[in-house]
Image (cartoon, helix red, strand yellow):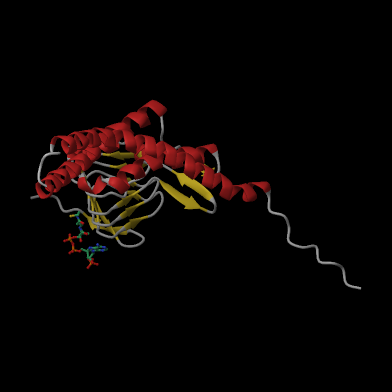
Amino acid sequence: MTEPSPGPKPLPLLHRLATPVQVLMTLVLYVELSALGGLAAAPGLYLAGKGFVVTAGWAPLPRAAAFGVMLFGAYFLYTLAVIFVAGAFRIVTFAGTPVGRFSYFSFKGFQWASYNAIILLVRYTCINFIRLTPFITLFHRLMGMKLGARVQINTAVIGDSNLIEIGDDTVIGGDVTLVAHAAERGLLVTERVKIGARVTVGLMAVIFPGVEIGDGSVIAAGAVLGKGTKVGSNEVWGGVPAKKLGDRKKAA
Ligand SMILES: CC(C)(COP(=O)(O)OP(=O)(O)OC[C@H]1O[C@@H](n2cnc3c(N)ncnc32)[C@H](O)[C@@H]1OP(=O)(O)O)[C@@H](O)C(=O)NCCC(=O)NCCS
């Protein structure tokens, strides 16, 4: 007679709870983001609502046009307001990505997710309209980034701002990915990123946690600087994974 099959092994408790915990965390964050986004939208909506009442006697077409302008104005007012609402919330709650290696389903994992959710609120609703303006640097400063003077940021794809430092006169090129976290074998690994002064990070380059770039260096368009890559001063790096291509010529 053959032995009855033992059947599949029961999943450990942590694995069984993972999806319900993730759903719960997501719903909590939706409530938090509704509060922050709603507060930031309030001034523009208030003014647009007033405008709608004031134009009540107008002919339908001019009224629709005026209301359209007011709604777009309300959107740009939201864009400016959300920078301060997000920043104030970050400061009051001491939010930020913690440094280290931790499970997605840990308290540190929640800290990482809830802090980056605030950044994503701004990224997904309006950040493309503040690229290459002082408003994007103000936003990241308020989110805890250490930023030098005259830094130009032309990308929406920045996470973990509180672990990033950028020196004076550096340019972060179009659609660069700049993050201080990586998912690795079921863990989140986070490390500070330091970019010096007068650096150019080329179009669509990818900068991973632990990267350090010395003053005056150039990172080629499309380069991928893997975790912990150290670039010296006045060097040119490019490729996937990025390697040193040479040294920067001295200006005549
Ligand atoms: C890397 C870079 C600085 C090199 O410019 P350059 O000094 O004019 O040099 P060249 O184009 O003559 O290329 C020098 C070497 O780098 C290599 N190279 C150039 N661009 C590269 C890139 N994006 N990725 C990998 N290698 C690159 C070239 O193949 C060449 O290699 P070789 O010496 O073996 O032939 C430039 O190509 C670049 O990517 N600049 C970034 C610009 C940018 O995106 N600015 C921000 C947004 S506007």
Residue at 35 percent across and 45 percent down: it is 120
Please state, as top left, top right, bottom left or bottom right, where the N terminus lies in the image: bottom right
Tell me which residue sits at (39%, 39%) in the image: 33
Q: Is residue 94 left or right of residue 175?
A: right
Residue at 87 percent across and 68 percent down: it is 3
Counting the numbered discs, the total is 0
Q: Quadrant of residue 52?
A: top left
Q: Is residue 147 visible?
A: no
In the rendered image, residue 68, in percent from the top left (x then y), is placed at 16, 46
Q: Nearer the viewer, residue 222 or 138?
A: 138
Q: Nearer the viewer, residue 133 or 51?
A: 51
Q: Residue 200: horizontal and vertical position, in percent?
A: 21, 50
In the picture as drawn, the residue positioned furthest to the right comes out as 1
Residue 100 percent coordinates (x, y): 49, 40
The picture quadrant for ligand 1 comes to bottom left
View extreme (top): residue: 92
Residue 131: percent from left, percent from top = 21, 46
Quadrant assignment, res 103: top right
